[in-house]
Image (tube, grey):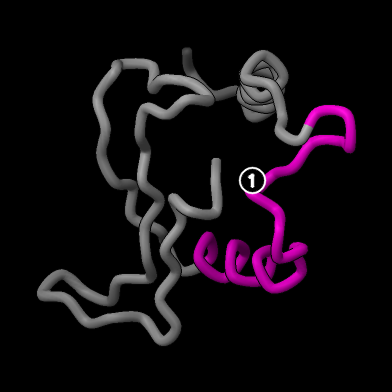
Amino acid sequence: LRWADVRVYDPPRPTPHGPSYGWVTVANTEDGETKTGSEGRVPLVEASARLLAARRAAAAAAERYVFAGTRHAPRLSAWWISDRFRYYARLARLPK
């Protein structure tokens, strides 16, 4: 997830369906493609918008990725993220 793909509204913007806290753009990039190959926007709930706004405020201005890796690997690998997702999904006993 790149900071360029995150929009957080402060204060939230009113919409006919309730307040909009922002969104994350899901797109195919040079870093990788979406699972389905399609692009779109995922709306943010209030808690997610607050978390991202706080993370952005604490991040270095030059950071490109929301969840940075180490100095040797500037971003987290897709494999690691998928592995962690499966691990926590099992812990939460989410259905496959």
Residue 78's image quarter?
top right
Residue 70's image quarter?
top right
Count of numbered tags = 1
Q: Residue furthest right?
A: 71
Using the image as rendered, state which of residue 62 and residue 90 is in the foreground: 62
Using the image as rendered, state which of residue 7 and residue 46 is in the foreground: 7
The relative height of residue 81 versus residue 11 in the rendered view (above or below) is above
The residue to which callout 1 is attached is 65
The relative height of residue 67 versus residue 50 in the rendered view (above or below) is above
Q: Which residue is drawn at 48% across and 21% down?
A: 32
> For numbered disc 1, what is the local secondary structure?
loop
* In this rendering, position of residue 90 left or right of residue 3: right
* In magenta segment, residue 71: yes
The relative height of residue 85 versus residue 79 in the rendered view (above or below) is below
The part of the chain drawn in magenta is 47-73
Q: Residue furthest left?
A: 16
* In this rendering, position of residue 64 left or right of residue 27: right
Q: Residue furthest bottom?
A: 11
Using the image as rendered, state which of residue 88 and residue 71 is in the foreground: 71
Using the image as rendered, state which of residue 19 and residue 67 is in the foreground: 67
* In magenta segment, residue 28: no
The relative height of residue 86 versus residue 2 in the rendered view (above or below) is above
Q: Residue at x 74, y 42 (%)?
A: 68
Structural crowding at the residue carrying mark 1, measured as other residues with C-alpha within 10 Å and reported as few (<14), some (14–19) or many (≥20) = some
Kindly identify the amino acid type of the residue bearing the numbered disc 1. Tyr
Q: Which residue is drawn at 50% across and 66% down?
A: 49
Whole-percent x and y of residue 88? Answer: 68, 27
Whole-percent x and y of residue 51? Answer: 62, 64
Q: Which quadrant holds the N terminus?
A: top right
